[in-house]
Amino acid sequence: MRIDVVSIFPDYLAPLELSLVGKARREGILDLQVHDLRAWTTDRHRTVDDTPFGGGAGMVMRPDVWGTALDHLLEPSTSSAAPGATTLLIPTPSGAPLTQQDAEELAGRERLIIACGRYEGIDARVAEHYAQRPEVTVREFSLGDYVLNGGEVAALVLVEAVARLLPGVVGNPASLVEESHSTAPGGGLLEYPVYTKPATWRGLAAPDVLLSGHHGKVARWRRDQALRRTAQRRPDLIAGLDQATLDEADRAVL
Ligand code: ADE
Protein backbone atom coordinates (compact mmCIF):
# COMPACT_ATOMS: atom_id res chain seq x y z
CA MET A 1 0.00 0.00 0.00
CA ARG A 2 1.12 3.53 -0.78
CA ILE A 3 0.26 6.46 1.51
CA ASP A 4 1.25 10.11 0.89
CA VAL A 5 0.77 12.65 3.66
CA VAL A 6 0.91 16.36 2.78
CA SER A 7 1.38 18.94 5.55
CA ILE A 8 3.02 22.29 6.22
CA PHE A 9 4.61 20.57 9.26
CA PRO A 10 6.15 17.39 7.85
CA ASP A 11 8.20 16.97 11.05
CA TYR A 12 4.92 16.38 12.90
CA LEU A 13 4.74 13.04 11.09
CA ALA A 14 8.15 11.85 12.39
CA PRO A 15 6.57 9.22 14.72
CA LEU A 16 5.63 7.27 11.58
CA GLU A 17 9.25 6.09 11.52
CA LEU A 18 8.79 4.31 14.87
CA SER A 19 7.35 1.04 16.11
CA LEU A 20 5.15 -1.16 13.92
CA VAL A 21 4.48 1.48 11.26
CA GLY A 22 8.20 2.26 10.91
CA LYS A 23 8.96 -1.46 10.65
CA ALA A 24 6.25 -1.94 8.02
CA ARG A 25 7.88 0.86 5.99
CA ARG A 26 11.34 -0.64 6.28
CA GLU A 27 10.00 -4.06 5.28
CA GLY A 28 8.28 -2.65 2.20
CA ILE A 29 4.74 -3.53 3.38
CA LEU A 30 3.92 0.17 3.48
CA ASP A 31 5.31 2.80 1.10
CA LEU A 32 4.65 5.97 3.11
CA GLN A 33 5.89 9.37 2.02
CA VAL A 34 5.52 12.69 3.81
CA HIS A 35 5.55 15.91 1.76
CA ASP A 36 5.87 19.59 2.64
CA LEU A 37 2.94 21.48 1.06
CA ARG A 38 5.16 24.56 0.72
CA ALA A 39 7.21 22.70 -1.91
CA TRP A 40 4.35 23.50 -4.29
CA THR A 41 4.14 27.24 -3.57
CA THR A 42 5.46 29.66 -6.18
CA ASP A 43 5.85 32.98 -4.31
CA ARG A 44 8.79 34.27 -2.32
CA HIS A 45 6.95 33.89 0.99
CA ARG A 46 5.80 30.32 0.23
CA THR A 47 2.21 31.34 1.02
CA VAL A 48 -0.35 28.58 1.63
CA ASP A 49 -3.26 30.54 3.12
CA ASP A 50 -5.35 33.69 2.76
CA THR A 51 -8.24 35.51 4.46
CA PRO A 52 -11.70 33.89 4.28
CA PHE A 53 -14.22 35.18 1.74
CA GLY A 54 -17.21 36.51 3.68
CA GLY A 55 -14.99 37.62 6.56
CA GLY A 56 -14.43 36.05 9.94
CA ALA A 57 -11.51 34.99 12.05
CA GLY A 58 -8.50 33.00 10.91
CA MET A 59 -7.07 32.00 7.56
CA VAL A 60 -8.11 29.47 4.92
CA MET A 61 -5.73 27.26 2.94
CA ARG A 62 -5.62 28.22 -0.74
CA PRO A 63 -7.07 25.76 -3.27
CA ASP A 64 -4.47 26.58 -5.94
CA VAL A 65 -1.54 25.43 -3.78
CA TRP A 66 -3.38 22.26 -2.73
CA GLY A 67 -4.41 21.64 -6.36
CA THR A 68 -0.81 21.78 -7.60
CA ALA A 69 0.33 19.43 -4.82
CA LEU A 70 -2.46 16.90 -5.30
CA ASP A 71 -2.25 16.94 -9.11
CA HIS A 72 1.46 16.18 -8.78
CA LEU A 73 0.79 13.24 -6.44
CA LEU A 74 -1.94 11.96 -8.75
CA GLU A 75 0.24 11.97 -11.86
CA PRO A 76 0.05 8.62 -13.69
CA SER A 77 3.68 7.84 -12.80
CA THR A 78 2.79 7.74 -9.10
CA SER A 79 -0.75 6.33 -9.16
CA SER A 80 -3.22 4.21 -11.04
CA ALA A 81 -5.85 5.99 -13.13
CA ALA A 82 -8.41 3.23 -12.43
CA PRO A 83 -11.73 4.59 -11.13
CA GLY A 84 -11.55 5.25 -7.38
CA ALA A 85 -7.95 3.91 -7.23
CA THR A 86 -6.88 6.71 -4.88
CA THR A 87 -8.69 7.76 -1.72
CA LEU A 88 -8.09 11.38 -0.75
CA LEU A 89 -8.57 11.75 3.00
CA ILE A 90 -9.11 15.17 4.51
CA PRO A 91 -9.08 15.32 8.33
CA THR A 92 -11.50 17.95 9.63
CA PRO A 93 -13.71 18.32 12.71
CA SER A 94 -16.64 18.63 10.32
CA GLY A 95 -15.97 15.22 8.73
CA ALA A 96 -17.70 11.89 9.38
CA PRO A 97 -16.37 10.11 12.51
CA LEU A 98 -13.60 7.62 11.69
CA THR A 99 -14.55 4.04 12.61
CA GLN A 100 -12.85 0.64 12.67
CA GLN A 101 -14.97 -0.27 9.66
CA ASP A 102 -13.47 2.69 7.76
CA ALA A 103 -9.96 1.57 8.75
CA GLU A 104 -10.69 -1.94 7.45
CA GLU A 105 -12.05 -0.58 4.18
CA LEU A 106 -9.08 1.76 3.72
CA ALA A 107 -6.60 -1.06 4.45
CA GLY A 108 -7.89 -2.73 1.27
CA ARG A 109 -7.12 0.30 -0.95
CA GLU A 110 -4.05 0.66 -3.14
CA ARG A 111 -3.34 4.30 -2.47
CA LEU A 112 -4.25 6.88 0.13
CA ILE A 113 -3.40 10.58 0.15
CA ILE A 114 -3.92 12.48 3.39
CA ALA A 115 -4.23 16.26 3.05
CA CYS A 116 -3.56 17.90 6.43
CA GLY A 117 -5.25 21.27 6.79
CA ARG A 118 -4.27 23.98 9.29
CA TYR A 119 -5.91 27.26 10.34
CA GLU A 120 -9.64 27.30 9.50
CA GLY A 121 -9.21 24.46 7.04
CA ILE A 122 -8.80 23.94 3.29
CA ASP A 123 -10.91 25.87 0.73
CA ALA A 124 -13.99 23.66 0.20
CA ARG A 125 -13.46 23.55 -3.57
CA VAL A 126 -10.52 21.19 -3.12
CA ALA A 127 -12.76 18.37 -1.80
CA GLU A 128 -15.41 19.29 -4.37
CA HIS A 129 -12.97 19.22 -7.32
CA TYR A 130 -11.28 15.91 -6.48
CA ALA A 131 -14.64 14.25 -5.78
CA GLN A 132 -15.41 14.93 -9.46
CA ARG A 133 -12.28 13.13 -10.66
CA PRO A 134 -13.10 9.50 -11.53
CA GLU A 135 -9.79 8.12 -10.22
CA VAL A 136 -10.30 9.70 -6.78
CA THR A 137 -12.65 9.02 -3.87
CA VAL A 138 -12.76 11.86 -1.32
CA ARG A 139 -13.43 11.24 2.38
CA GLU A 140 -13.54 14.04 4.95
CA PHE A 141 -13.15 12.41 8.37
CA SER A 142 -13.08 13.48 12.02
CA LEU A 143 -11.38 11.89 15.02
CA GLY A 144 -14.15 13.04 17.35
CA ASP A 145 -16.16 15.97 18.62
CA TYR A 146 -13.26 18.21 19.59
CA VAL A 147 -11.03 20.56 17.65
CA LEU A 148 -7.32 19.99 17.03
CA ASN A 149 -4.88 22.55 15.66
CA GLY A 150 -4.60 20.76 12.34
CA GLY A 151 -4.93 17.46 10.53
CA GLU A 152 -1.49 16.03 11.39
CA VAL A 153 -2.49 14.19 14.56
CA ALA A 154 -5.52 12.80 12.73
CA ALA A 155 -3.18 11.62 9.94
CA LEU A 156 -1.02 9.81 12.52
CA VAL A 157 -4.13 8.13 13.93
CA LEU A 158 -5.42 7.13 10.52
CA VAL A 159 -2.09 5.70 9.32
CA GLU A 160 -1.69 3.65 12.51
CA ALA A 161 -5.28 2.35 12.43
CA VAL A 162 -4.90 1.30 8.78
CA ALA A 163 -1.28 0.05 8.78
CA ARG A 164 -1.81 -2.40 11.65
CA LEU A 165 -4.46 -4.14 9.53
CA LEU A 166 -2.07 -4.78 6.61
CA PRO A 167 -0.96 -8.43 6.41
CA GLY A 168 2.39 -8.93 8.17
CA VAL A 169 2.30 -5.76 10.32
CA VAL A 170 0.87 -7.15 13.59
CA GLY A 171 2.79 -10.27 14.72
CA ASN A 172 -0.25 -12.28 15.82
CA PRO A 173 -3.26 -11.50 13.59
CA ALA A 174 -5.56 -13.21 16.15
CA SER A 175 -5.04 -10.18 18.38
CA LEU A 176 -6.93 -8.08 15.81
CA VAL A 177 -10.07 -10.22 16.18
CA GLU A 178 -10.86 -9.90 19.89
CA GLU A 179 -10.03 -6.24 20.41
CA SER A 180 -12.46 -3.37 20.97
CA HIS A 181 -14.51 -2.35 17.92
CA SER A 182 -13.62 -5.53 16.04
CA THR A 183 -15.98 -6.01 13.12
CA ALA A 184 -15.50 -9.80 13.27
CA PRO A 185 -18.56 -11.92 14.20
CA GLY A 186 -19.49 -11.41 17.86
CA GLY A 187 -17.58 -8.08 17.80
CA GLY A 188 -18.81 -4.50 18.01
CA LEU A 189 -18.20 -4.47 21.77
CA LEU A 190 -15.51 -2.89 23.92
CA GLU A 191 -12.79 -5.33 24.91
CA TYR A 192 -13.00 -7.22 28.23
CA PRO A 193 -10.48 -6.25 30.98
CA VAL A 194 -7.13 -8.06 30.87
CA TYR A 195 -4.80 -9.30 33.65
CA THR A 196 -1.31 -10.78 33.97
CA LYS A 197 1.13 -11.80 36.77
CA PRO A 198 1.30 -11.38 39.71
CA ALA A 199 -2.03 -13.05 40.55
CA THR A 200 -2.44 -10.65 43.47
CA TRP A 201 -1.13 -7.08 43.32
CA ARG A 202 -1.59 -4.50 46.11
CA GLY A 203 -4.36 -6.64 47.58
CA LEU A 204 -6.21 -6.92 44.27
CA ALA A 205 -6.67 -10.48 42.97
CA ALA A 206 -7.02 -11.29 39.29
CA PRO A 207 -10.40 -13.01 38.69
CA ASP A 208 -10.21 -16.71 39.68
CA VAL A 209 -11.88 -17.88 36.50
CA LEU A 210 -8.91 -16.65 34.44
CA LEU A 211 -6.59 -18.93 36.43
CA SER A 212 -8.98 -21.92 36.26
CA GLY A 213 -7.72 -23.24 32.92
CA HIS A 214 -11.37 -23.76 31.89
CA HIS A 215 -11.50 -22.31 28.36
CA GLY A 216 -15.29 -22.33 28.10
CA LYS A 217 -15.73 -20.48 31.38
CA VAL A 218 -13.01 -17.98 30.48
CA ALA A 219 -14.70 -17.24 27.14
CA ARG A 220 -18.10 -16.74 28.81
CA TRP A 221 -16.63 -14.49 31.51
CA ARG A 222 -14.87 -12.36 28.91
CA ARG A 223 -18.01 -12.04 26.83
CA ASP A 224 -20.04 -11.02 29.94
CA GLN A 225 -17.43 -8.41 30.87
CA ALA A 226 -17.36 -7.03 27.32
CA LEU A 227 -21.15 -6.75 27.29
CA ARG A 228 -21.31 -5.10 30.75
CA ARG A 229 -18.53 -2.66 30.00
CA THR A 230 -20.05 -1.70 26.66
CA ALA A 231 -23.53 -1.25 28.15
CA GLN A 232 -22.08 1.04 30.82
CA ARG A 233 -19.61 3.08 28.77
CA ARG A 234 -21.02 2.96 25.23
CA PRO A 235 -24.78 2.27 25.25
CA ASP A 236 -24.84 3.51 21.65
CA LEU A 237 -22.84 0.41 20.63
CA ILE A 238 -25.31 -1.92 22.36
CA ALA A 239 -28.19 -0.21 20.57
CA GLY A 240 -26.39 -0.80 17.24
CA LEU A 241 -25.74 -4.54 17.81
CA ASP A 242 -27.34 -7.07 15.50
CA GLN A 243 -29.78 -8.78 17.90
CA ALA A 244 -29.31 -12.05 15.99
CA THR A 245 -25.68 -12.20 17.22
CA LEU A 246 -26.81 -12.26 20.90
CA ASP A 247 -27.44 -15.60 22.62
CA GLU A 248 -29.51 -16.21 25.75
CA ALA A 249 -26.55 -15.76 28.08
CA ASP A 250 -25.79 -12.41 26.40
CA ARG A 251 -29.35 -11.22 26.89
CA ALA A 252 -29.21 -12.22 30.58
CA VAL A 253 -26.26 -9.80 31.04
CA LEU A 254 -27.96 -6.91 29.25
N1 ADE B 1 -8.62 18.80 12.51
C1 ADE B 1 -8.97 19.58 13.53
N2 ADE B 1 -9.76 18.93 14.39
C2 ADE B 1 -9.93 17.68 13.90
C3 ADE B 1 -10.65 16.53 14.32
N3 ADE B 1 -11.39 16.52 15.44
N4 ADE B 1 -10.60 15.43 13.56
C4 ADE B 1 -9.89 15.43 12.42
N5 ADE B 1 -9.19 16.48 11.97
C5 ADE B 1 -9.21 17.60 12.70
Image: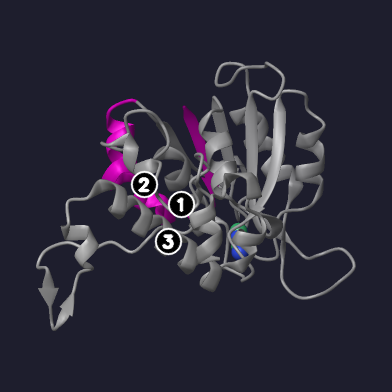
Q: Mark 2 or 3 closer to N-term?
A: 2
- Determine the quadrant in which ligand 1 lies: bottom right
Q: Amino acid at mark 1?
A: Leu
What span is colored magenta in the figure? Answer: 1-28
Q: Residue at x 51, y 39 (%)?
A: 185
Q: Residue furthest bottom?
A: 203
Q: Which residue is mark 2?
A: 16
Question: In the visual, does 48 lie left or right of 13?
Answer: right
Q: Amino acid at mark 2?
A: Leu
Q: Is mark 1 within 8 Å of ligand 1?
A: no
Indicate which disc, 2 or 1, sits on the residue closer to the N terminus. Answer: 2
* Contact? badges 2 and 1 (CB < 8 Å): yes
Q: Which residue is mark 3?
A: 224
Q: Is residue 16 magenta?
A: yes
Label 1 with label 3: CB-CB less than 8 Å: no
- Farthest left residue? 198
